[in-house]
């Protein structure tokens, strides 16, 4: 069944991100975020008061403070009152909400931003608090341990091995040498086991960062951007929450989201995958049927910079930038959330023929 | 720029959760050394059990006992256990499909033989915790096992004294840093001064400063000393005594516009009977020892401020 065409043409017209760093403790969240908001607005010439809808993604658990997103709103300029929403998710899901809002015709432009400061706490421990509170969270299995269970399942299934995983990590960080925002670039030792079979090189850097995207509909997009990255389809799906219910070597939710986003109708030339662990790229390549003709993670991906809550939105922004620059005509962007690729969002972006 | 402030921040909660009928049976079963699954309409047995079929979303509740022995479906070697994890020596995380189940349970495997002694497909059995309360941690861990399938107890999942809730303590440790603007604010308090920041665009002075003007969405950086005196813009009378707070009720909690500030901050009013506090009252800070915010504000004795001078700040 072909994916339905969106009711309105909506495009990414601007994207900005911070330089992602291990720590940015001299800055509050809003101080880290604000320059990114200013840069993304400057790309389009829009002011806050011109934006029809604002949506953000972040989580209080990184900062350990309730309602931290309300403080970040200071960086937007929310007075006089604006139309605004927040998701306790990666900014890719905030973009999905904004896209939906634009589809309704209630707004023609949207500002989407996301940020995460991982430096105040321990991400491996913090992420345990998103797990099933009855059967799993009391055991405190950290994010690396859960990814390692998935990696071992892939090795047992013959889908990969440790040298192949190391190659994914090396390729990603080599690609990141062209990305001045990335946190880990170039040659990075594969290192010792973090949780076997994953080595430190298979794991994403822990860092602070923010990103912002502007969406616009129809003619407005053409006014704001020379070559808009049109969102031809976007969809997100979720797996059963029980890890032991799932086949960890596959990602049916990614495949279904991709189908509904229209990915399989025509080949893509670029794929920005949100695979924080090298082993997860193996799962995603299979689910998305990516072959050697596709440039996977030219930005370096999440193995080069993984600011929690922003890394998925950055995949969409990086894919859109490739289109806006003319380096890509049809690109896939993927975002994930939860343990072992639990939730997955797929967007298909296109530039108009040149 | 002075060094940015940092301090330990511990967020700790005993999360109390109630259980549905299936979870209640499962966790009570663990207390009684019985492992229960739930059977789906198409005959699969899910362990740990859930109340809704993850495929069809139909409500399910038919309990069925499975064995306390099983097979590892995948594993990961954890050489450096973290706080709260089931074992404090190196162990393997495992997904175990118990004999009689179609899905796997996540837990720890105590493997004294080390990582090389663990493999997918290995046989394991439950090691019960000595003290069991009706929680997933009643399974202390799994251990290697090369015997036959464990015998069932014959339980049908009906117990007296059902466990109906769990308390899951959660603790996360942070190092809090307030960032550039608030660091400067806190450092000024130690010198018994209050500083705000002026927006370069609308010229308003924000106290405490947060680094950005919420109206204009731009960075604030020009520091401005405000106060020490100010005006009560609005207030309330608190009649409920807070736990761990050594203040007699009733007391007055007020919004106070310090002289030179364009935003009111809040503080307690003292040195005047609670029923004589009023809008427009002129107050000044009474500093506590050892830095930090003023303990409270007290009347200065000046005439009350005209409403027009603070009406924009109410």
Image: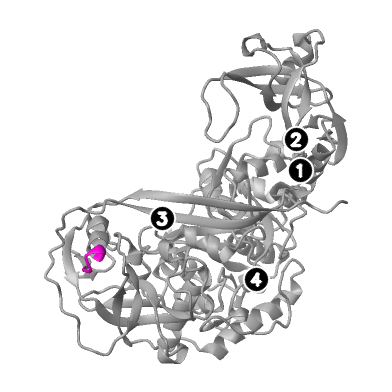
The answer to whether marks 2 and 1 mark residues whose Cβ atoms lie closer than 8 Å is: yes
Which of labels 1 and 4 is toward the front? 1
Residue B270 visible in rendering: yes
Toward the viewer: B39 or B188? B188
| Chain of residue at mark 3 | B
Q: Which one is earlier in the sequence, the residue at label 2 or at label 1?
A: 1
Number of marks in picture = 4
Image: magenta residue range: B30-34
Same chain for marks 3 and 2?
A: yes
Compared with B294, B52 (above or below) is below
Pick the quarter of the image with the C terminus of chain A.
Answer: bottom right
Residue annotated with mark 4: A205
Residue density around tag 1, few if under 14, some if 14–19, many if 20 or more, within 10 Å: many
Q: Is residue B111 left or right of residue B61?
A: right
Q: Nearer the viewer, mark 3 or mark 2?
A: 3
Per the rendering, the mark at residue B208 is: 2
Whether residue B110 appears in magenta in the rendering, the answer is no
Q: CA distance from mark 3 to mark 2?
A: 36 Å
Magenta residues: mostly which secondary structure? loop
Q: Find residue B182 and name its label.
A: 1
Chain name for mark 4 = A
- Residue B31 falls inside the magenta stretch: yes
Residue labelled with disc 3: B168
Q: Quadrant of residue B40?
A: bottom left
Q: Are marks 3 and 4 on the same chain?
A: no
Q: Is residue A40 above or below residue B188?
A: below
The quadrant holding residue A227 is bottom right
Give the x, y percent position of residue A289. Answer: 47, 77
């Amino acid at each position: 069944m072909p994916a339905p065409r969106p009711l309105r043409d909506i495009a990414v017209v601007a994207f900005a991100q911070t330089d992602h760093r291990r720590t940015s403790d001299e800055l509050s969240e809003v101080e880290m975020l604000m320059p990114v908001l200013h840069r993304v607005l400057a790309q389009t010439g829009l002011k806050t008061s011109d934006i029809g809808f604002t949506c953000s993604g972040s989580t209080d658990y990184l900062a350990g403070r309730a309602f931290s997103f309300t403080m970040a709103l200071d960086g937007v300029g929310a007075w006089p009152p604006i139309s605004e929403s927040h998701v306790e998710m990666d900014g890719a899901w905030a973009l999905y909400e904004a896209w939906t809002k634009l589809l309704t015709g209630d707004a023609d432009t949207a500002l989407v931003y996301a940020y995460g400061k991982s430096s105040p706490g321990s991400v491996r421990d913090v992420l345990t608090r998103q797990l099933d509170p009855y059967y799993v969270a009391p055991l405190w299995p950290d994010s690396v341990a859960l990814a390692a269970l998935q990696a071992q399942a892939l090795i047992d299934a013959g889908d990969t091995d440790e040298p192949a995983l190391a190659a994914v990590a090396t390729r990603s960080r080599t690609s990141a040498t062209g990305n001045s925002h990335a946190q880990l670039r170039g040659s990075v030792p594969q290192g010792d086991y973090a949780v076997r079979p994953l080595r430190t090189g298979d794991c994403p850097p822990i860092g602070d960062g923010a990103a912002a995207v502007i969406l616009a509909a129809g003619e407005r997009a053409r006014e704001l951007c020379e070559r808009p990255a049109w969102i031809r389809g976007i969809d997100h799906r979720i797996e059963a929450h029980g890890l032991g219910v799932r086949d960890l070597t596959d990602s049916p939710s990614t495949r279904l989201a991709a189908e509904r986003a229209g990915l399989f109708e025509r080949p893509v030339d670029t794929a920005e995958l949100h695979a924080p662990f090298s082993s997860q790229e193996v799962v995603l390549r299979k689910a998305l049927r990516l072959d050697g003709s596709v440039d996977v993670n030219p930005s370096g991906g999440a193995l080069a910079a993984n600011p929690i809550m922003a890394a998925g939105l950055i995949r969409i922004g990086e894919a859109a930038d490739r289109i806006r620059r003319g380096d890509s005509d049809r690109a896939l962007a993927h975002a994930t959330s939860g343990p072992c690729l639990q939730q997955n969002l797929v967007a298909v972006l296109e530039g108009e023929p040149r | 720029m002075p060094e940015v402030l940092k301090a330990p921040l511990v967020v700790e909660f005993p999360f109390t959760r109630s259980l549905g009928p299936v979870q209640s049976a499962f966790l009570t079963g663990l207390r009684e050394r019985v492992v229960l699954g739930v059977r789906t309409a198409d005959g699969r047995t899910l362990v740990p059990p859930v109340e809704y079929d993850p495929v069809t979303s139909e409500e399910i509740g038919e309990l069925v006992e499975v064995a306390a022995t099983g097979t590892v479906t995948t594993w990961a070697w954890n050489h450096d256990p973290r706080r709260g994890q089931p074992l404090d020596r190196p162990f393997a995380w495992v997904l175990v499909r118990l004999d009689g189940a179609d899905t796997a349970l996540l837990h720890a495997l105590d493997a004294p033989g080390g990582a090389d002694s663990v493999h997918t497909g290995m046989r394991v059995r439950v090691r019960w915790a000595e003290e069991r309360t009706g929680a997933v941690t009643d399974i202390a861990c799994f251990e290697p096992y090369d015997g036959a399938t464990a015998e069932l107890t014959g339980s049908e999942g009906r117990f007296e004294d059902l466990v109906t809730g769990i308390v899951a303590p959660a603790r996360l440790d942070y190092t809090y840093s307030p960032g550039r603007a608030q660091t400067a604010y806190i450092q000024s308090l130690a010198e018994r001064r209050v500083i705000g920041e002026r927006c370069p665009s609308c010229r308003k002075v924000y106290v405490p400063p947060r680094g950005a003007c919420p109206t204009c969405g731009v960075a604030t950086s020009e520091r401005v000393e405000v106060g020490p005196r100010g005006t009560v813009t609005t207030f309330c009378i608190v009649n409920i005594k807070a736990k761990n707070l050594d203040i007699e009720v009733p007391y007055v909690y007020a919004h106070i516009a310090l002289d030179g500030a364009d935003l009111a901050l809040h503080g307690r009013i003292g040195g005047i009977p609670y029923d004589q506090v009023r809008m427009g009252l002129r107050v000044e800070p009474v500093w506590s020892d050892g830095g930090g915010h003023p303990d409270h504000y007290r009347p200065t004795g000046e005439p009350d401020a005209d409403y027009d001078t603070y009406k924009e700040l109410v």
